[in-house]
Image: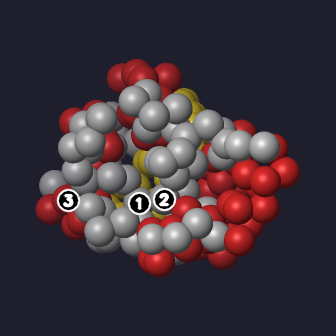
Amino acid sequence: MRDDEAMRRAVALAETVRRSTAPNPWVGCLILSDGEVVGEGATQPPGGDHAEVVALRRAGGRSRGATAVVSLEPCAHHGRTAPCADALIEAGVTRVAIALLDPDSRVAGEGAARLRAAGVEVSVGAMEREARHSLAPYLHHRRTGRASAWSRQQRASTGA
């Protein structure tokens, strides 16, 4: 499976949890070994595992030497969970394809930098346009500190 095919699936996985992850971004991740999907996951509700950890858990030992395909840069900070970049390194992933870097000031390139410093090959930009479209409300909020018009409309239509 090529990066763009895998990333398309990662973005689709992220969309399935879009309404349950706030304030975290909705992210999808696939673990590929020899071009085959051996694990996949999406971010769980706050306090739960991020997409990378779900996918790594499902892949088990098959993640060693594998490629992770992630719709948003893996986090590099401690919050409710440990950094996903560290989880990928510890699992022995040798390559990470990222759709786009996370503008959150606690990440902002640090996840990719941490992976590279550990000797993991990192590529950025596979299906970036699609991931950016999916994550538009999150990206807007991280850049401006305000909810997007789309987010306000969704809350109004659901009574949230």
Q: Which of marks 3 and 2 is nearer the N terminus?
A: 2
For image coordinates 78% across by 61% down, the residue present is 153
Question: Which amino acid type is marked by label 3?
Answer: Arg
Q: Quadrant of residue 96?
A: bottom left
Instruction: Identify the disc placed on residue 72.
Output: 2
User: Which colour assignment does the render follow?
Assistant: secondary structure
Q: What element carries label 2?
A: loop
- Please say if the residues under marks 1 and 3 sit with CB atoms less than 8 Å apart: no
- The residue that mark 3 highlights is 114
Q: In screen coordinates, is 32 left or right of 132?
A: left
For image coordinates 54% across by 57% down, the residue present is 71
Q: Quadrant of the C terminus?
A: top right
Q: 10 Å neighbourhood of mark 2: few (<14), some, or many (≥20)?
A: many
For image coordinates 45% across by 71% down, the residue present is 145
Q: In screen coordinates, is 134 left or right of 82?
A: right
Residue 111 seen in render: yes
Q: Which residue lies furthest to the right in this view?
A: 157
- Please say if the residues under marks 2 and 1 sit with CB atoms less than 8 Å apart: yes
Q: Where is residue 86 in the image (x, y as percent from the top left)?
A: 23, 43
Q: In which quarter of the image is residue 90?
A: top left
Q: Where is residue 75 in the image (x, y as percent from the top left)?
A: 33, 52
- The residue that mark 1 highlights is 73
Q: Nearer the viewer, residue 14 or 56?
A: 14
Instruction: Identify the disc placed on residue 81.
Output: none
